[in-house]
Image (tube, grey):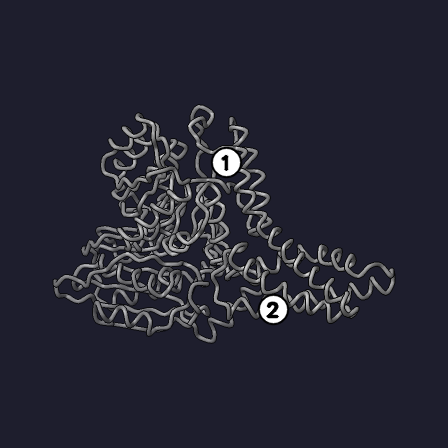
Amino acid sequence: MLTPILIPAYEAEPALAETVDALRRMGFERIVVVDDGSRQPDSLHILNQLDGVHLLKHAVNLGKGAALKTGLNHILLTWPDACGAVTADADGQHSPEDIAAVAAKLAGMPGHLILGSRQFRGEVPWRSKVGNRISSKLVKLLVGTRLSDTQTGLRGIPSTLARQLLKLPSNGYEFELDMLLAAKHLGVAAVELPIRTIYLNCNASSHFHPLWDSMRIYLVLMRFTLASVLTAVIDNAVFAIAYHSSPNILVSQLTGRSVAVIFNYAAARKAVFLSRGPHRDTLPKYLLLVTANAAISYLLITLIHDRLQAGVVAIKVAVEAGLFLASFLIQRDLIFSRKQGEATDWTSYYESVPPTAKLTRKYSASALVRMMRAAGLMPGAHMVEIGGANSCFYDRLTREFKPSRYEVIDTNRHGLDLLARRASSEVELRQESVLELPVDPRADVVFSAGLVEHFDRRGTRQAIEAHFDQAKPGGTVVVTFPTPTLLYRMTRKLLEAVGLWKFPDERPLLQDEVRQVVEERGEILEERILWPLILTQGVVVVRKSPVTAEAPQRVNISVAATTGVEPRP
């Protein structure tokens, strides 16, 4: 398996060697262990005896965050083709099966942060249960996302996020919380995957210190408060000085706010929300908030002062305190946060298919049959469907063509299980990502529907090329994809408005984008738009070049399967 596994280790115990051995038996070839300054002879012996790993060392203990950054940097340089990396703890808390599940999830959703979330049921050490409950509530306030396990060390980190994490200053356990903040404000959606909760010897081998490390973690959550307090001190001090010189509330308010805003913008952007959005996007929105905040503050101060005749400075402090939470929420969600790139929940979709989809599928299946026949596909063919979990085409295609072999490739285990219940024993189900498929050109026809549009432009190219890598020379490739006609855009807007749109990461593709890729690998036999579907679908049927020359080398790339990464066509 090509997804790298990263394990930071400090004073490692035998559980580390057992985890590494199990991962190697499961086929993981890229395992990185970072020794964070271990000194105990037994630990050094365990580390030095590890086989088949890239062992990196710190001369001194720098902290878990520093070890993770060292490992991520090594992975980005050594395997630039990887979709990301999976981090796991060295103390045996994460089973190899769960590590593999997170790796598979990351491969299928390479633009998302995958969190292996423990369930905290049964006998769980108090420091883990209490600490996670507190941090979960605080993270909900700070990030605006409800996560059941904020302290999990089992994470699938996309390479796009990993590059940004290298710039974070935190080096201890607080790095993992900073990771959640960075993901939020870089527009990288977090997806939780339930895992087993394992604590060996009541978690005695953990190097997490409940008091000190908890303080460091929660200090991360206090950064906005600290920045706001310092801003308020500057604002009110300048306001008091200006008001003492000239008792004009408006002039004093503008003077104090103008000075304070210079400090607060830099602090909020870099230290609190870890935002790296361009100033041209964040600064105008921030200044608009400041203007509105100042106007509301001025009106309230003036109103209260006129009615109560209380001290102006005291009134200002009280008013600003009342506006604190509103300002925080606006900055968190509207100013220093990119649009969250939500992923399509395919499991829920497979469990409850809309009635309209059942009708459109019949039309799509008929269109596929007609186009495959026109391309010369004969009974007994070898067929490969990519992205076909719980395939809606399997029954019709097997009835029409009676294939000698039918393979379905998808990352969604639930969808594959649903298909297995109703399909014949001849169907071959492969839980793999289209972005990590090995070149295996044997199929007579390779097709997909509703797949390639769920990536950014580079990911879409790679997904289309994977079709040709599975088709034999002279074989047929069929790719369908939504295309942004006026009908599509109007229909989608309507469905989004009424809350019925289920594919937030769908990126409708211009036909030229698809044509540019397929023409490099074969001859277009047919190209059309399926207008009766309303959410119009483009279709291209291609004959793969019959030459046996080696195809252009293709490398796996990090993609963000989210509509927020690139503008829609």
Kind of residue at badge 2: Leu
Q: Nearer the viewer, residue 150 or 222?
A: 222
The answer to which of 538 and 171 lies nearer the viewer is 171
Furthest residue to the front?
Answer: 245
Question: Does residue 5 sit above or below 387 in this rendering?
Answer: above
Spot occupied by residue 556 in the image (x, y as percentages of width and height): 28, 56
Q: Tag 2, which secondary structure?
A: helix
Left or right placement of residue 273 versus residue 383 in this view = right
**Where does the image place residue 122, in percent across and percent down from the top left?**
52, 28
Q: Position of residue 494 (x, y in %)?
A: 55, 68
Q: Which mark is residue 119?
A: 1
How many marks are shown on the rendered structure?
2
Quarter the N terminus occupies:
top left
Q: Is residue 534 left or right of residue 364?
A: right
**Nearer to me, 534 or 290:** 290
Label 1 packing within 10 angstroms: few (<14), some (14-19), many (20+): some
- For mark 2, does the 10 Å Cα neighbourhood hold few (<14), some (14 to 19), or many (20 or more) residues? some
Q: Which residue has dot 2 on it?
A: 287
The type of residue carrying mark 1 is Gln
The mark found on residue 413 in the picture is none
Q: Is residue 382 rendered to the left or right of residue 270?
A: left
Residue 419 in sight from this viewpoint: no
Specify which label sits upstream in the sequence, 2 or 1.
Answer: 1
Query: Could you say whether the residue bearing mark 1 is in a helix, strand or loop?
Result: loop
Residue at point 67%, 61% (across, down): 235
Q: Gap in Å between the C-alphas at discs 2 and 1? A: 43 Å
